[in-house]
Amino acid sequence: MSDFSQIQRAVLSFFETKVQKSDLFKIRDKVGKKTLEVEKSAEKDKAKKEIQLQALLGEQQEARKEALKTVIPAWLTECANKAVAVGKPMLKASHPAKFSHGMIPYSGVYVSSLGSKSKYLTTDSLNNRYFDVVMSNGNLITHGRFLMTVLDDRTVYEKLEANDDQWLYEFSKNEEQVEAWSSGLKNWLDTHPQRVPVSRLKQNFFPVDDGYHLLSPLFSSVLCQKIYEKSRYDKSNAQRKKARKNGQYAEGETFDLPKMAVLNFGGSQPQNISVGNFERRGEAYLLSCTPPPAWVESLQLPIHATSLYGGEFERRAWYLTQRLQRYLVKLHKQRSNKAIRDEVKRSVDEIIDVLLNYVAQIQNLENKAGWTREAADLKASHKLWLDPYRSEQKFQDARREGDWQAEICHDFGQWLNKKLEHKKMVFERVESRFWAKRLKAQLREFELGLEVKA
């Protein structure tokens, strides 16, 4: 993007990576796939594929130039108008209240870092400028992500707070239009930062000399983000850990967080909690506080299984599958309606949440990378999903191709059909495909967190 300014590059990148319906996102996806084809192609085909890649890159560059004149100005107008129409601000927060209880009205507290030098890990000791954004409606998630987009040294939200409108001139030289954008977008700002206590906020009373002091512990999205970045998205750290695993030298120190637990917020709708929670796919990593001698690893790898959809996962999902079966049996003679369909989708998404959590726990056992070599009976596609750090190049090539994902989803659909079978109900391929489609929608997002380490 050397032909564009830093601010233009940042906004174009937002569309290419965050707005899936945009043409910029679609062509970037094509470029990425074609680049992989070039890298994996045989020498006799490489020249032809490189020509195709160059053509796509040229098309991408033209799409970017056109977007600066049409797509982005239209988006800014829509975003500004939406802010006025919604009439509720996006709240800048370091501690969103919805992490404490999902039924709390959207709110939170923003605590800026003072750069503490304490040896303890706290929000203040992070000394960074990251903040989360909470909104009144999960459908506004794309607008919230836009406000968190870093343009140069500040986010869109911070520029609006500072009354900095100069960046808008990158997309229009019309002063009247820039003023309209600025005026509308500022309606997203929280101009009344007073927070009102709510009954569902967890509260503790701590005894002091004159009675009790009220404590309202809030979940720190800022601290959660730092742990998430270090554990999942630190590319250089991942490379050093891979070198260590392979017995090779690498410059620098590795950063490890052993025995982490995964806590999920928001279920299948993580955007209903906050923008940061959505970016983290609803995952929060909890650090172990247990002394190492007392920690007992209870997770059993499916080495002797034929499918990941049995054994441990089946036990974890047993209650949810039984509950869904009872619900369907109760209503099997009733005509389907939206309420029933929505309840079925919600229940299936809960089962998928259990599946993804189970798989994430296995994937995080990096010290056992390559364990699937011993799993002689386990399906190949299941090995590819469960053992992402296995070192053989052939294995990693097969994993990157992604063909295994279709079988993973297909097997899930068949497994769930079997679990829901009842003498009063018969499930056909159409239901199996529907269950598979629900998993497919989340599997791509789930795998994105591993691409850096692949």
Image (cartoon, rainbow, N blue to C red):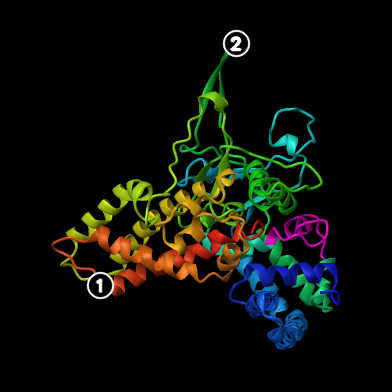
Q: Nearer the viewer, mark 1 or mark 2?
A: 1
The reply, left or right, for residue 260 in relation to residue 308 is right
| Dot label at residue 428 | 1
Res. 37 visible in picture: yes
Q: Nearer the viewer, residue 302 or 275?
A: 302
Q: Which residue is mark 2?
A: 209
Res. 49 visible in picture: no
Residue 107 rendering spot, x and y as whole percentages:
57, 46
Mark count: 2
Is 148 included in the stretch rendered in magenta?
yes
Q: Main secondary structure of the magenta part?
A: loop
What residue do we see at 79% from left, 36% from top?
Answer: 114
Amino acid on which the number 1 mark rests in the picture:
Glu
Q: Quadrant of residue 147?
A: bottom right
Q: Secondary structure at mark 2?
A: loop
Residue 39 rendering spot, x and y as whole percentages:
70, 74
Q: Which residues are magenta?
A: 147-165
Q: Assign the C terminus to one quadrant of the image.
A: bottom right
